[in-house]
Image (cartoon, rainbow, N blue to C red):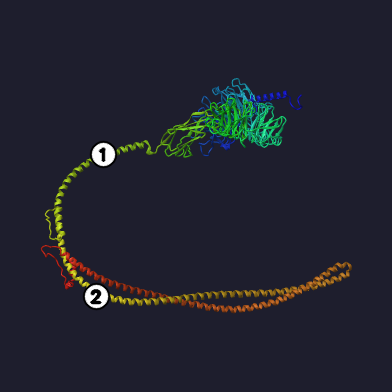
Amino acid sequence: MSEPGKPTDQARAFRRAAAALAIACAICLPRTGEAQRLQFTKLTADDGLSGPWVPSIYQDARGFMWFGTRRGLDRYDGYSIANYRHVRGDSTSIPDNYIEFVREDRDSVLWIGTRKGLTRFDRAHDRFVTYPVGPGVEGRLVLSFLHTRAGQIWVGTDEGLYQFDRATGKSTRYARSAVLGLAGKNVVGLTEDRRGHIWISTKEMGVLDLDPATGAARPYLLGNAIDSDIRGSIEDDAGTIWVGSYHGGLVKIDPISGAITRYQHDPANPKSLNLNAIQTLAKNGRDGLWVALENGGLDRFDFATATFSHNTYDPNNPTGLNNNSVWGLFEDKSGTLWLGTFAGGVNVAKRNSDAIRTYRSVPGDATSLSVNSVLGFAQDSSGNVWVATDGGGVNRFDVTTGRFTRYTSKSSALNVDAVLAVAAEPNGVLWLGTWAGGITRFDPSANSFTAYTSKNTNLPDDNIFAMHVDRRGRIWVGSWHEGLLLFDKASRSFTKFPIGDAGPGQSEIWCIEELRDGRLALGTRESGLRVFDPETHQMLAFGAAGSSATSLTSNEVRAIREAEPGVLWVGTAEGLDRVDLSTKVVTHVSRGDGINATAISGIAADGDGNLWLSTDQGVTRFNPTLKKGQQFTKADGLQGRDFNPRSYFRTRLGALLFGGNEGFSVIQPQQLAQNTHVPPVVLTGFQLMNKPVAIGAKDSPLETAIGETKRLTLSHKHSVFTFEFAALDYTSPAKNQYAYKLDGFDREWRDAGTQRSAVYTNLAPGSYTFHVKGSNNDGVWNEQGASLEVVITPPFWASWWFRLLMIASIGGAIAYVVRTARERRQGLEQVNAQLAAVAEKDRAAQQYLAGNVREMLHAMSLFSEGDLSVRLDATTNDEIGQLRHGFNTAVANIRTMVVQVHDIVTATVEASQHIRASTEQMAAGAAQQIEQAALVASAAEQMTTAVADNARHIGLVAEMAQRSGEDAQEGGRVVRDTFSSMDTIVSSVGSSAQTVAALGQSSQEITKITRVIEQLADQTNLLALNAAIEAARAGKHGRTFAVVAEEIRDLADRTSSSTKAIALVIRENEEAVKQAVDRMGQVSAHLASGRQLVDRAGGALDSIIENSGKVLESIKQVTHSSEEQAETTQHIGRNIETISRVTHEAASGNQTIASAVQELSALIEDLQTRVARFRLGGEAEHLVVEKTEDAMMIPLSRVMVGV
């Protein structure tokens, strides 16, 4: 028998089988219940969305996403949102911000429905053209649009159906509107089926199947008022029409038979439609429909099972819908689902959103993860996943519901909340490794916790990083400082196995992996990889030892996975290593082999031989054979960028779990289909000098939008320009890759990574072609990409016409130079001939000139020797003859001049002797003048000194007189001040006397009052005496009154005595006041007398001041006269000095004249000697001047004539 309360082996086996069946059922139903919940990213006003109410979403032919909001139109390229709003006064802007729909026609022209008509988007110029539909200038509210295969455009408005002519821009009401009853109706949807019929959805009269060729129409749902409000219809790939009703749910119509099938909400069926209020429909591939509900979220209808799965708003689910009212639906070319909500903006469910799911702690939700720091996982026999958290205890994760059960120190008997590791036994018992709490045995079935610590066992270390239950059920423990431990459950004791040669602090074990041969691979923090044999206790070590073949990339081993027997994949802090235990060879996987991360924190394997690596850069799916990797990041739904060491796990059904500090992520590798969508690549922007360029603006090179431009012409001045581009795949835009190339400049493609712009600077003038290509998140490239011809015009001096003009100019210049040179050469030849003739003439002239020059030189030689009789023959009339004649004339003139000089010299000798005699007489007179001038100068100097002394003394007297005048003026001011003060004192004494007199009068009045008080006291005394008498008469009844009378009498006596005393004091005051008044009168009399004396003193001082002023003025006049006398005396002295100086100069001049006369005599003698050298011919041979005593008597007139 089994123990009471314990299940039997049969029961346990049954329970395990049931649990396995439940898990299998959960996995086998991937499109129902929890498995179908979608994860959404959001676009809101924070991302640039115009408004939160988004009724329409569309992807155009170029790949852009368009959002019609109630506040404007938006265009999205995966990175940024461009807003288009109405601008008052701008007819090219959108006419109204209330957007009802966005659609393209079959020619890829974009049309927008607004409250003010139908609007066409002009892509080339980035503007709008609006056409009114219906009556009125601005038109009606346009609700729907259809461009049929036959080329007709149908427009549904809030008052009927119209046909639109795009060529003329005119709209006309459909001719059979009245017959069909469409006039005045809200036509909210138009759908063309494969037959060419148009399904017209209305709010008032259901849906009509119209054959536009015949005008015949078949109404549906007319008889049911509930079903009359239709919001849209859609045709699936089988030709079935699906209609969404706002009140009647989903309706399926067979267009051939007209059969109708309804799908409505059934409260008893959780797989029925969530709510009957349908807003719109969209196809989900070939096997389902998306159904947008008002206040019911999003449903997916599965064609095969005819069931609905639900996605609704959950405030505790941040990755779910953020609003339950879904108005717009669109599934784009890559399979991404776009939802427009009433108040939550745009919700986006991307491909593979079910393949990667992240779980986090949600504040206020007790069924969410307890904390976000996840350190380890384990799976029990029931399929539940147990999550170890740092600070949140251990969590049980129900994979079928996605909910958590928390076990913490507050909610259970767990001793600490820092759970670093968890391992599960086959019987469901868990072993927890904790920080500072040892290990804990947790039996979930009994909700019991048993802690084993250093306090109650021989556990050497209470900090446990790794736990493992091997195939034999043994409990292995990886500690912080004490290495590997084996726990014996029976004895509750631990056996320690040292980590080889690891020193102190190097025995920290982070992870334990059991190999297929039973050995344990241990990852340590500082001692590398250790492989331990539990049977032999042998330890094989691999560490980071340089470039050795057995060296790891790092000693910090974070993860281990056995890929095949004896071959380990080891993740370290520096990379990924492959370790072959048989050969002990370690192979490093470099970053270029498909891994873009450094630190490898976790390793898990899928069923296809791929390794899934959690790193410091996200998660990488690595193919070891091909050495290729695919990166997954937070943009793909992961918890974050970085992951924790040891926090990785693979469930028995192949799900991969990776934990970090923002929760943990569950990856379903089998659901991760590759994104094969080839993204369109478009140019989205153009900048010059890092500034956006407007279309059609002044000096703008853009005539059309950059995405519509085929050829761009730039000036050579545009030295810096930038192209912006985007690959329009929205699965994970942040991971889209780009490469670009400029033909004519770049030789190779430039790898731009995720960067979406290309900048070029200082390109030479010429023609170029810009190419850009891009990929989606999975590396599928659009090799064709986008291209644009770029022409950079040269400056005018580098243009072809300027160069041609310059060539022509240079050619003309060369021709001119050649012609000019030829003409110059001919001219030079003529000049040379003329020069030869001239040279011959010059030679003959030189001979003639030489003969004449020799003859003239001989004559000049004779002339220079003093021969004045020389003469040349001057018979010719040429220049030589004229020169000869000039020479003869010059000789004759000189001969005449010599004769005249002889006469003058004679006269000069006589004059010089006469001057010498006169000069001697003048010298004697000058000596006498000098003596007299010296005497006069001495007398003048003495007079000047006396005058200067007088002037100085008079100045001192004037200064003393001035000071006396100032003292007298100061005395006058003092007298005046004294006089004023005497007036003030007299006035004050008079006022004081009046005051004392008034005081005496007041004392008399007080005396009168004291007399009255004294009389009152006497009368009071009499009254008291009468009262005493009356009290005596009253006997004992008057005793009290008698006492009062007695007190009154005493009071009257005291009052009388006090009054008399006051009267005495007052009389004394009166006497004192009288005396004070008398004395003040005397003071006033004396002050009046003093005032008269002061007045007289002031008059005397005024007279003194006046006389002092007169004396001072006289002294100033005397001083002035003395100064003038001194100046005159000085002037006389200076004149005498001048006379003396002139006399001395005259004496000196006489001496100089005497000397000059002597020199003149000497010169005359010399001149006479020289003149005597000349020969005159025909006259005396020599001219001699004789010295005579009478020579000085030659008349002066003769001398002057000679000169």
Displayed quadrant of residue 557: top right
Amino acid at the residue labelled 2? Gln
Per the image, the residue denoted by label 1 is 819
Is residue 179 in view from this perspective?
A: no
In front: 849, or 439? 439
395 to the left or right of 1025: left
> Quick one: quadrant of the C terminus?
bottom left
Say which label, 2 or 1, has the lower sequence index.
1
Q: Position of residue 876 (x, y in %)?
A: 12, 53
In front: 526, or 651? 526
Amino acid at the residue labelled 1? Arg
1186 to the left or right of 218: left
> Quick one: quadrant of the N terminus?
top right
Q: Where is residue 92 in the image (x, y as percent from the top left)?
A: 50, 36
Displayed quadrant of residue 605: top right
Q: Position of residue 1199 (x, y in %)?
A: 18, 69
938 to the left or right of 41: left
Q: Residues within 10 Å of mark 1 (few under 14, many from 20)?
A: few
In front: 708, or 725? 725
The disc placed on residue 921 is 2
Residue at the (74%, 76%) spot, across then down: 1064
- Of helix, strand and loop, which one carries label 2? helix
Whole-Å distance between the Cαs marked 2 and 1? 93 Å
Rendered position, 704 above or below 842? above
Q: Where is residue 828 in the image (x, y as percent from the top left)?
A: 22, 42
In front: 290, or 177? 290
- Of helix, strand and loop, which one carries label 1? helix
Rendered position, 149 above or below 913? above
The disc placed on residue 269 is none
Displayed quadrant of residue 922: bottom left
Rendered position, 108 above or below 879? above
Is residue 732 in view from this perspective?
A: yes
